[in-house]
Image (cartoon, coloured by chain):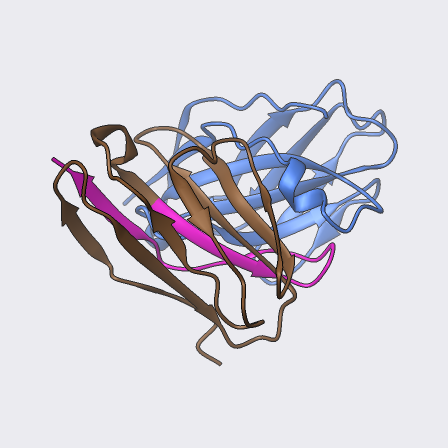
Amino acid sequence: DAKTTQPPSMDCAEGRAANLPCNHSTISGNEYVYWYRQIHSQGPQYIIHGLKNNETNEMASLIITEDRKSSTLILPHATLRDTAVYYCIVRPRGRVDSNYQLIWGAGTKLIIKP
Amino acid sequence: NAGVTQTPKFQVLKTGQSMTLQCAQDMNHEYMSWYRQDPGMGLRLIHYSVGAGITDQGEVPNGYNVSRSTTEDFPLRLLSAAPSQTSVYFCASSYPGGTQYFGPGTRLLVL
């Protein structure tokens, strides 16, 4: 299964867009890119996922490069409550037990500053 | 819906003691799982279940037992606690192949 590389930490000013990069250069064609976040040791929270196309929901936008080797999670107007650890994970498509093949790295600790 | 609930929130054990961490979900999810998370690390899968009566081992199953007698509940048993089991434990549930929903966690300290 493909692994991901994320910067260990990032800062962002409150109200600005937070752009979190993720490298997944070994991703295969049948793997999704998933993003979760974990606020202050709470349980991880699903944010968004995508396969090829860019995706947007009420929480964030996901931009996946054309070659699918990297992606960026965008929080358009970051607030202090967005301070959390953000995990980028690749997940096989089409397997009902694919959640149990995930590799959870250390993620990116995003700190939103006032 | 309460989602995924876990009890207790905190627990302190002495080495050698046993205990059960409780997990329940009210979303009628078939799949449930247990993870542990050590400081500064990502999640590691302990055990999972794809339905009542069916369980399987994850990456780090040693020292833990599970059973799944109902769709709603998936308890995790520590047979003889060791300091290496000090961690935060998360339970999660999902539909087959669906997005996982996580509980709030149980913080366990083994002295």
Residue A39 in view: no
Residue at image position (69%, 55%) is A56
Q: Total marks drawn?
A: 0
Percent from the top left, x then y, of residue B42?
A: 45, 32
Is the residue B31 above or below the residue A103 in the image?
below
Q: Quadrant of residue A111?
A: top left
Could you tell whether A21 is left or right of B90 in the image?
A: right
Residue at image position (80%, 28%) is A68
Asked if the magenta segment contains residue B1, the reply would be no
Locate the C terminus of chain A by quadrant: top left
Asked if the magenta segment contains residue B106, the reply would be yes
Query: Which residue occupies the foreground of this view, A72 or B90?
Result: B90
Query: Which residue occupies the foreground of this view, A114 or A110?
Result: A110
Is the residue B27 above or below the residue A64 in the image?
below
Query: Which residue occupies the foreground of this view, A84 or B78?
Result: B78
Percent from the top left, x then y, of residue B7?
A: 30, 64
Could you tell whether B60 is left or right of B53 in the image?
A: left
Percent from the top left, x then y, of residue A14?
A: 36, 47
The blue-coloured chain is labelled A
Q: Which residues are magenta?
A: B89-111
Residue at image position (77%, 51%) is A96
Is the residue A69 above or below the residue B89 in the image?
above
Locate the N terminus of chain A by quadrant: top right
Residue A16 in view: yes
Residue at the extreme right of the image, as rendered? A29
**Picture colour for chain B:** brown
Could you tell whether B68 is left or right of A90 in the image?
A: left
